[in-house]
Amino acid sequence: MSGSWFLMSGAAVVMLLLTPLVIRLRITSWTVGWLAILLGSISVMALLGLTARLTDTDGRPTLVDDLDS
């Protein structure tokens, strides 16, 4: 998971760096599409980070472990 996280973060950073150039082009439909993809990728990364944090069970008993004991 950490390798794909690095690639997604790199793609979002590249898009953030190129966003001023895209806005200066003043092609409205292209700019709106670019910003939609950028915001979508950032929100997906945030949701993936949140689910990874919430489902981290290192050292904590899981429901299955509780039923066995």
Image (cartoon, rainbow, N blue to C red):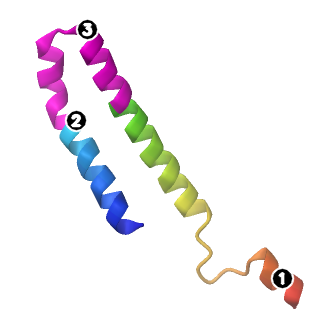
Q: Which residue is found at the position 62% from the left and 75% from the top?
A: 57
Q: Secondary structure at mark 2?
A: helix
Q: Which residue is found at the position 54% from the left and 62% from the top?
A: 53
In the depicted structure, whether residue 35 falls above or below residue 3? above
Q: Which residue is mark 3?
A: 28
- Residue 5 lies in what quarter of the image? bottom left
Q: Which residue is found at the position 37% from the left and 25% from the top?
A: 36
Sequence-first tag of 2 and 1: 2
Measuring from the top left, give residue 51's x and y in whole percent. 57, 56
Q: Which residue is mark 2?
A: 16
- Residue 18 lies in what quarter of the image? top left
Measuring from the top left, give residue 49's x and y in whole percent. 48, 55
Sequence-first tag of 3 and 2: 2
Measuring from the top left, give residue 26's x and y in whole percent. 16, 9
Q: Is residue 8 left or right of residue 44?
A: left
Measuring from the top left, give residue 30's x and y in whole percent. 25, 16
As rendered, which of 35 and 54 lies closer to the eye?
Answer: 35
Q: How far is the residue under mark 3 from the one under mark 2?
A: 17 Å
Of helix, strand and loop, which mostly describes the magenta segment?
A: helix
As rendered, which of 54 and 41 lies closer to the eye?
Answer: 41
Sequence-first tag of 1 and 3: 3
User: Which span is picked out in magenta?
Assistant: 16-37
In the depicted structure, whether residue 39 falls above or below residue 24? below
Q: Which residue is found at the position 33% from the left and 32% from the top?
A: 38
As rendered, which of 69 and 40 lies closer to the eye?
Answer: 40
**Neighbour class for label 1 at 10 Å: few (<14), some, many (≥20)?**
few
Dot 3 amino acid type: Thr
The answer to whether mark 3 and mark 2 are in CB contact below 8 A is no
Label at residue 66:
1
